[in-house]
């Protein structure tokens, strides 16, 4: 993915929308930056991931499909992810989730699974956009 920055202390710092999330159960952290076009579609994405394998895999699944989506679509996906991970909702329409689906059986991993979506929600909230 050519538009995705990885690693480094400032990977998300140069983007207009920035957010972070931390899993209280495992301590995994993710910083995210997004740049959008005039139609509110994600054009650029930067991630700094310090997470367990589930958190890293989930961040990769998020990053692979986030580009080209609107902020509204990402908000909806975040809500669907929360419901799906905790067992109260159907499988969200997000490519690649089958790669991390087995982790749903382990509640201690739910926070890591949701990191990227929570960071995206935080980024939008910091700019007055509520999901």
Image: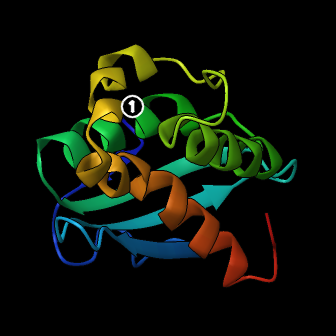
Q: Nearer the viewer, residue 80 or 74?
A: 80
List x then y, in percent, for residue 65.
Answer: 53, 29
Q: Nearer the viewer, residue 32 or 84?
A: 84
Neighbour tally class for label 1: few under 14, some 14-19, many 20 plus, Cα within 10 Å: many
List x then y, in percent, for residue 97.
Answer: 44, 22
Q: Is residue 109 above or below residue 127?
A: above
Picture quadrant where residue 57 is located: top left
Q: Residue at x 12, y 51 (%)?
A: 52
List x then y, in percent, for residue 86.
Answer: 51, 43
Q: Is residue 13 above or below residue 34?
A: below
Res 16 seen here: no
List x then y, in percent, for residue 40.
Answer: 81, 52
Res 22 seen here: yes
Placement of the N terminus among the 4 image quadrants: top left
Q: Which residue is mark 1?
A: 61
Q: Residue at x 66, y 21 (%)?
A: 93
Q: Residue at x 36, y 23 (%)?
A: 101
């Amino acid at each position: 993915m050519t538009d995705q920055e990885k690693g480094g202390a400032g990977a998300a710092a140069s983007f207009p929308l920035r957010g972070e999330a931390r899993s209280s159960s495992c301590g995994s952290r993710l910083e995210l930056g997004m740049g959008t076009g005039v139609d509110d579609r994600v054009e650029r994405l930067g991630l700094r991931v310090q997470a367990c394998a589930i958190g890293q895999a989930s961040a990769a699944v998020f990053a692979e499909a986030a580009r080209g989506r609107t902020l509204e679509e990402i908000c909806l996906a975040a809500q669907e992810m929360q419901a799906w991970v905790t067992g109260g909702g159907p499988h969200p329409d997000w490519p690649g989730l089958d790669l991390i689906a087995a982790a749903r059986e382990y509640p201690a991993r739910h926070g890591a699974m949701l990191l990227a979506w929570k960071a995206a929600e935080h980024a939008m909230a910091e700019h007055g956009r509520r999901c």
